[in-house]
């Protein structure tokens, strides 16, 4: 049920038709983030591969990115925009949390998303097969990295004040192993050895952003999780892109 709750929460696909999920299950979805990455990253990689057979890679890459936006309902991108608006425009803990909860997008969010997608588009110079592999690996591994946030910070709001009305419960040891396995398996299976340094670099934005959250709001929010995932993923992608251009 926890896995089904994760699919329901993080995608717009009709998994809710399969079974009614107890509200308690949504508090235990963190270890299943990488498995959600198998779905969202797998769909994006499949769309990329199919489109890449009949159209220019740059166009296929754009369509693949759009496919994930549709599958996730832009959930993570909304989090990134709110995070940038809050931390960019807020001068106090209360103000940052208030801005992030506001559904309107501001200047920091708009500019940040533009830069984010411009950087993502640069990956269109990679070979199709490599980009497909990276698409799956980056999604799974970055969700695995981002899931560790709850080990270091508490939730910054009260449960009734959260957007989703959910505060994640601590992850048990067995669940942690599941998350690591789910995040690492695509790397072992599909990531060429020359690109393995990219496994390490997402921990850099993870550490920096965790410290920033601790300093500014003494915790994390759902928007912080979404922003952290996308920035870890972007770091993974750019590391691989750098490795390719230097080879």
Image: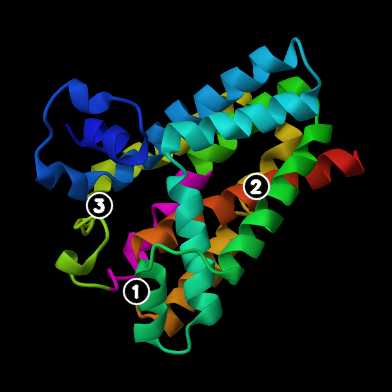
Between disc 3 and disc 2, the foreground one is: 2
Q: Earlier in the sequence, mark 3 or mark 2?
A: 3
Residue where numbered disc 1 is placed: 219
Q: Earlier in the sequence, mark 1 or mark 2?
A: 1
196 lies left or right of 219: right
| Numbered disc 3: secondary structure | loop
Magenta span of residues: 142-156
The residue closer to the viewer here, 172 or 36, is 36
* Residue 36: quarter of image: top left
Q: Earlier in the sequence, mark 3 or mark 1?
A: 3
Between disc 3 and disc 1, the foreground one is: 1
Give the CA separation, mark 3 to mark 2: 24 Å
8 lies left or right of 40: left
| Numbered disc 2: secondary structure | helix
Residue 153 in magenta stretch: yes
Query: So how many labels did they put on this image?
Result: 3
Q: Which residue is pictured at 52% across the width and 61% down the height? A: 81
How many residues crowd around disc 3 within 10 Å: few (fewer than 14), some, or many (20 or more)? some
The residue closer to the viewer here, 247 or 146, is 146
In x, y percent, where is residue 129? 73, 20
Give the CA separation, mark 3 to mark 1: 17 Å
Q: Residue furthest front?
A: 104
Q: Which residue is pictured at 23% across the width and 56% down the height? A: 168
Residue where numbered disc 3 is placed: 171
Give the CA separation, mark 1 to mark 2: 24 Å
Residue 182 visible, this angle: no
How many residues crowd around disc 1 within 10 Å: few (fewer than 14), some, or many (20 or more)? many
In x, y percent, where is residue 21? 13, 34
Residue where numbered disc 2 is placed: 236
Residue 144 in magenta stretch: yes
Q: Is residue 114 above or below residue 91?
A: above
Question: Marks 2 and 3: in contact by CB < 8 Å?
Answer: no
């Amino acid at each position: 049920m926890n896995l089904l709750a994760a699919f329901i929460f993080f995608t717009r696909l009709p998994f809710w038709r399969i079974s009614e999920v107890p509200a308690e299950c949504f508090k235990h979805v963190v270890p299943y983030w990488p498995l959600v990455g198998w779905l969202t990253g797998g769909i994006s990689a499949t769309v990329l591969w199919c489109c890449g057979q009949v159209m220019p890679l740059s166009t296929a890459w754009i369509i693949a990115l759009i496919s994930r936006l549709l599958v996730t309902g832009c959930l993570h991108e909304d989090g990134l925009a709110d995070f940038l608006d809050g931390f960019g425009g807020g001068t106090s803990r209360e103000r940052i949390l208030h801005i992030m909860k506001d559904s309107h997008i501001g200047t920091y969010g708009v500019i940040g998303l533009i830069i984010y997608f411009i950087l993502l588009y640069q990956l269109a110079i990679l070979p199709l097969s490599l980009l497909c592999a990276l698409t799956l690996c980056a999604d799974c591994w970055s969700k695995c990295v981002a899931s560790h946030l709850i080990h270091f910070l508490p939730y910054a709001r009260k449960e009734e004040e959260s957007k989703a009305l959910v505060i994640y419960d601590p992850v048990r040891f067995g669940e942690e192993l599941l998350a690591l396995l789910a995040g690492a398996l695509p790397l072992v299976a599909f990531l060429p050895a020359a690109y393995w340094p990219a496994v390490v670099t997402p921990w850099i934005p993870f550490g920096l952003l965790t410290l920033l959250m601790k300093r500014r709001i003494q915790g994390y929010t759902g928007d912080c999780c979404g922003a952290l995932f996308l920035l870890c993923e972007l770091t993974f992608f750019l590391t691989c892109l750098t490795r390719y251009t230097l080879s």
